[in-house]
Image (cartoon, rainbow, N blue to C red):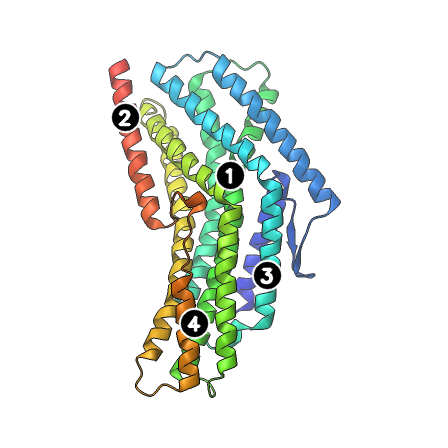
Amino acid sequence: MLARPRQVRRWLYELYAFYAIFIGVTSYRYDFELRQGRSTRWTRFVATLANLIVVAVTLVDLLGVWFVILDVNVVTEQTMRLDATVNDMICLVRVLQRLPQDRACNQIVLELRRLRRIHQYHATGQDSQLEHWLEHIYLAKNCIMWAVASFLLAFMLLVYQFMGVPPTNVYLDRLLLILNVLAMDGQDVAMHMHFLLSWHICRLYVRLNRRLGQLLRGDSPPVDTLELLQLRWQHARLSDLMQRLTSAYKLTMLSNRLCLVVTAAALGYYISIFRAQPIIYQIVGFGFFALLALDSYILDLITDWTVHCHRESSWLLRQHQQLPCAEGQLSRACDLFTLQIACFPLQLKPCGLLECGRATWLSNVACIIVWMVVLLQYRIVSE
């Protein structure tokens, strides 16, 4: 029963890894046989070539957006220009961040492998309900990533038809459109790697807490204080890895927030002006909007769960301290463990600006709704 979800995760990761290399998000791919990340000559060549294509397509798109006169409303034209400019600049930032993120992710993967070799958490008891939810979230996030790419391509095709731009060369225009979609989708693919590493860290936290609960409740053989100290060290290492992951992806996470607000607000505005168009415009627009919101929610959800699992260790230790007959040496080890968690809380704030979590996601949704209303008001006034 455990082998089947593992095989599904492996298949989904292999599919994602080849796609990420193809569009230039990363040059590393985790080798399950060697149990380490690998970057070969061909993967580096493909990723570098894809980055050069992204830069070229982005510059062409910027020139086309700002120097081609569109036969649309003034508010619509300025909204399209702002949306395209923000997305193109984010693509350039992502290209510049590829090498530092590759090195950081490879080191974090190696550290996670060492932690799993030191202590096999999965051998202690049955899977908890949260672990089952993690499996569902993993599957849902992968499905949403591919759905976002599909809806993005369909939406861009509809937008080009709506603007009525006369094609100079049909095949060249379609090729540039596909390349532009792949460049824009690279932001979501880059954040998917952040999700994968956060997901693994959260799962190790869950298994560590399960083992910690077994030791403190007496559901295992006599408590070994050395094992409790080992769990304390591993807890600190997981916190450090999560902080390093946030530091490596800080610019990508901030740009993803900006891209979500601008793109979703512009998308809501586009849906409102598509009312006179066929129903397919409305379906694709609403579907793309819902997928963007759901994808961002899952990213914030996994960070919330990771922080919650970090704090849950402290709650388990406090329950043991309240017992009337706690063994002296074990009690001192629990006190040190609790003090470590209290002195080094897990705070995920990229660049110290925004704290990752569902509360920030709600504020982003409120910001999107406000800007949608503002754009609609400007359109009403301009007409």
The one of 216 and 358 positioned closer to us in this rendering = 216
Label 1 to label 2: alpha-carbon separation: 26 Å
The residue mark sitting in front, 1 or 4, is 4
Q: Which residue is mark 1?
A: 187
Taking 381 as reference, is 261 left or right? right
**Which amino acid, by three-letter code, is at mark 2?**
Val
Identify the secondary structure beneath mark 3. helix
Res. 52 image quadrant: top right
The label number, if any, that marks residue 111 in the structure image: 3
Disc 4 target residue: 337
Mark 3 → mark 1, Cα distance in angstroms = 25 Å
Mark 2, residue position: 374
Q: Nearer the viewer, mark 3 or mark 2?
A: 3
| For discs 2 and 4, the disc positioned in front in the rendered view | 4
Determine the residue positioned at 46% across, 40% down. 148
- Is residue 245 visible to the viewer in this orientation of the structure? yes
Q: What crowding class fits label 4: few (fewer than 14 Cα within 10 Å), some (14-19), or many (20 or more)? A: many
Asked whether the beta carbons under mark 1 and mark 2 sit within 8 Å of each other, the answer is no
* Distance of label 3 from label 2 (alpha carbons): 47 Å
Residue at position x 33%, y 27% in the image: 269
Q: Earlier in the sequence, mark 1 or mark 4?
A: 1
Look at the numbered discs 3 and 1 and tell me whether their residues touch, using CB distance below 8 Å. no
Q: Can you name the residue that lies furthest to the right here?
A: 41
Query: Gap between marks 2 and 4, in whole Å?
Result: 51 Å
Mark 4 lies on a secondary structure that is: helix
Where's residue 97, x and y in %?
57, 39
Circle 2: is it few (<14), some (14-19), or many (20+) Cα within 10 Å?
Answer: some
Q: Earlier along the polypeptide chain: callout 2 or callout 4?
A: 4
Asked whether the residues under the numbered discs 3 and 2 touch, taking CB atoms below 8 Å apart as contact, a structural biologist would say no
